Image (tube, helix red, strand yellow):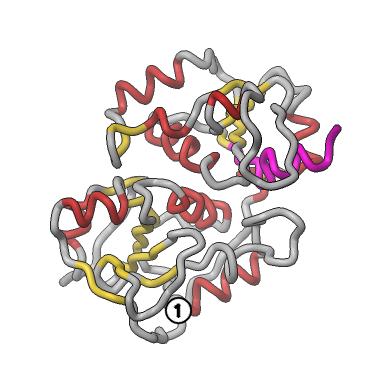
Amino acid sequence: MKAIQLNTPIVSVDWLNANKDASNLIVLDATINKIIDSNSERILNARFFDIKKKISHVSAPFPSTLPSKEQFQTEAQHLGVNKDSCIVVYDDKGVYSSARVWWLFKVFGFNKVAVLDGGLLEWTLQNFPVNNYVNETYQRGNITVEFNPELMTNFEGLNQFIKDPNVLIVDARSEARFKCLVDEPREGLRRGTIPNSKNSPFTDLFNGNIFKPITQLSEIFSNLEIENRTLLFSCGSGITACVVALAATLCDYKDLIVYDGSWTEYGSLTD
């Protein structure tokens, strides 16, 4: 099959099934904390993108921290990603950690990447083909990357954004966590909320496994009274913040930033 073009941040399972044999397509399984063995199911011939163990700053004190440019490029090349590749990324929860990988590629200057709307759940619901993982190596890719620091911020940057009236901080955690009504799932992490932030739970963005229509997503964002402000997304550890960033992208919002460490970092470093 001929090469494809990819210029949208999400694709449907129907689209992926129709284009699954494209010569420059690479499908990445971004399921977090997945154990890969011969019993592990995947979308046909997907390659495993290991956020936790290979494509994050594994020695950092907080989970899933942004890797270096060199680390990201090396691991993407090991997965066979080329400059002309088109990437579709999915996970096994619908849309969850796949959005983090989509954002990582954007942070490192590669934009021919889309999230599979509904992920493995929607793919199998439609009875599209799956197979099991085998021990594979790939021809080394030639992708080169450049770091775009304006798309990601850290603790020091966040403390400046908190004071900026032109920035709206959007917290993707549940309302109960945002309002400190329940404990954080990470053991030892205190309850709390980043100052001057608003809550928009990532779970509100979906009908079942797939994103709500753009009109409904736009209504969710309009309720935040964004006006012309930059949007800065946070969550528990920087994963689901990217889901809300993806939804904002679908609604054509610009000037988007993800707080890498999110509440895990902020709650650990503040009283």
Residue 50 or residue 79, whichever sits in front: 50
Q: Please, is residue 20 above or below residue 234 in the view?
A: below
Instruction: Say if residue 75 shows up in the picture.
Output: yes
Q: Please, is residue 138 above or below residue 102 in the view?
A: below
Q: Please, is residue 111 above or below residue 176 in the view?
A: below
Name the quadrant of the C terminus.
top right
Amino acid bearing label 1: Gly
Residue 39 or residue 43, whichever sits in front: 39
Label 1 element class: loop
**Residue 44's quadrant in the figure?**
bottom left
Provide the residue span drawn in magenta.
257-271
Residue 81 or residue 119, whichever sits in front: 119
- Image location (x, y in percent) of residue 200: 51, 25
- Image location (x, y in percent) of residue 50: 51, 67
**Residue at x-position 62% and y-position 29%:** 182
Residue 216 or residue 40, whichever sits in front: 40
**Residue at x-position 59% and y-position 37%:** 235
Q: Bin the neighbour count of mark 1 within 10 Å (Cα to Cα): few under 14, some 14-19, many 20 and up.
A: some
Q: Please, is residue 12 above or below residue 80 in the view?
A: above
The verdict on residue 267 being magenta is: yes
Q: How many marks?
A: 1
**Residue at x-position 66% and y-position 55%:** 63
Q: In the drawing, does residue 94 fall left or right of residue 72? A: left
**Residue at x-position 65% and y-position 34%:** 183
The verdict on residue 185 being magenta is: no
The residue carrying mark 1 is 141
Name the quadrant of the N terminus.
bottom left
Instruction: Say if residue 168 shows up in the picture.
Output: no
- Image location (x, y in percent) of residue 71: 63, 71
Q: In the drawing, does residue 86 fall left or right of residue 3? A: right
